[in-house]
Image (spheres, helix red, strand yellow):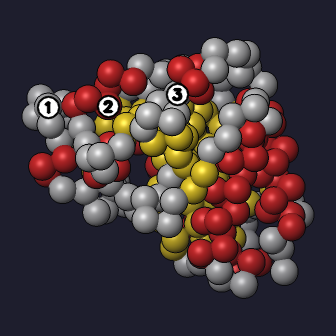
Amino acid sequence: MNIEIKKSKNPIKYKDAIEFMEQRVLDLSQDKSRDLVWILEHEEIYTAGKSYKKNEILDKSIKIIETNRGGKITYHGPGQLICYFVIDLKKRNKDIRKFISLVEKTIIETIEFYGISTFADKENIGIWYNDKIDIKKIAAIGVRVSKWIAYHGFSININNNLKKYESIIPCGIKNKGVTSLTKINNQDYNELDDKLIKIFISNLKSQVF
């Protein structure tokens, strides 16, 4: 299976990333390109998916970028790993649900490598951690499908500024908090991106029909 792996060392502007992915969707739909997995970091930005509501913005002074991905409002910034992808679902029986499950599995298995147990929730999309006091989100997922090509992706909170989430109702969920890997267990996560890529590619290979 031919997948391009792209890793950006410097922060990528959100708009530039979206334009790059949308062009890649077009190229892939015309068989001019390959599937893509792209690891990066964004500068500070709040983005809102198709189903967000205005009352989920608590601090009206912040700037919100509306986007065409699924989901609601979230925050991106330094210390957060972003994994974008452009994946042809025509090679995977056009099964969107199964692909989302694969994404969830990839995140859970990657975090599990560091001795942290997380889980997916059918009611609230994303990956969650139970600290025995509260259930908190550790990873957000937002996917769009065009021409049977899945794109956008997910984010994992490693050591980002969690106070930034106080300006919004993250992902529209009022009764659950947000956490990061270093808050759960302050260890070395420098190789997390490489672990994630390895696990994601392995899971993708297992889902090609």
Q: Which mark is residue 165?
A: 2
Look at mark 3 in the image and give the residue it sits on. 180
Gap between marks 3 and 2 measured at Cα: 12 Å
Position of residue 111 in the picture relative to residue 133 (left or right): right
Residue type at mark 2 is Tyr
List the single residue furthest toward the front: 132
Q: Classify 50 as above or below 153.
A: below
Q: Classify 191 as above or below 150.
A: above
Element type at marker 3?
Answer: loop
Nearest to the observer: residue 120 or residue 59? 120
Residue at (84, 80) in percent of width and height: 209
Look at mark 1 in the image and give the residue it sits on. 59
Q: What is the x, y in percent for residue 150?
A: 59, 66
Residue type at mark 1 is Asp
Gap between marks 1 and 3 measured at Cα: 22 Å
Classify the position of the N terminus by image quarter.
Answer: bottom right
Q: Are marks 3 and 2 in contact (CB under 8 Å)?
A: no
Q: What is the x, y in percent for residue 76?
A: 42, 33
